[in-house]
Image: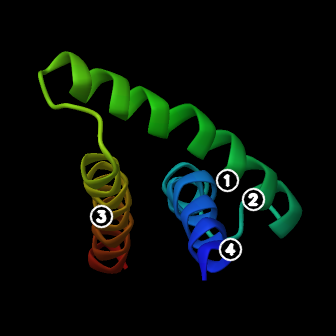
Amino acid sequence: MQIVITIFAAVFVLFLPGFVLSYVFFGKQTIDSIERLALSFALSIAVVPLVVFYTNLLGIRISVQTVIIQVVLVILIAVLIIVGKQIKKSRIK
């Protein structure tokens, strides 16, 4: 069971935020899947520590719960931006 939790946590922290952010910065057809995969890891490794660091400077202690909340917020904000872009595109057409 510990292996499953570790794999899920690694994907959740090291891949998922960057994957969603790659759709924010690059549209659906802009880059291919290999580039998106590599960019997902790079963006996650760059963004997650920065978010945790700056929220720690604001006085929010670093713990498992706060990191999970911060990663979820990064993902939700990115999804909202993607949805906003899609709504804007549909209004223009």
- Of 18 and 93, nearer the camera is 18
The kind of residue on which mark 3 rests is: Leu
Residue 8 picture location, percent across and down: 58, 72
Residue under pointer 4? 3
Ranked by sequence position, the earlier of labels 3 and 1 is: 1
Residue 37 picture location, percent across and down: 77, 60
Ranked by sequence position, the earlier of labels 4 and 1 is: 4
Q: Nearer the viewer's eye, disc 2 or disc 4?
A: 4
The kind of residue on which mark 2 rests is: Arg
Ranked by sequence position, the earlier of labels 3 and 2 is: 2
Callout 2–callout 1 Cβ contact below 8 Å: yes
Residue under pointer 3? 76
- Of 20 and 26, nearer the camera is 20
Q: Residues within 10 Å of mark 4 (few under 14, many from 20)?
A: few
Residue under pointer 1? 40
Callout 2–callout 4 Cβ contact below 8 Å: no
Residue 80 vs 73, above or below: the answer is below
- The residues tagged by marks 3 and 2 sit, at their Cα atoms, a distance apart of 19 Å
- The residues tagged by marks 4 and 1 sit, at their Cα atoms, a distance apart of 22 Å
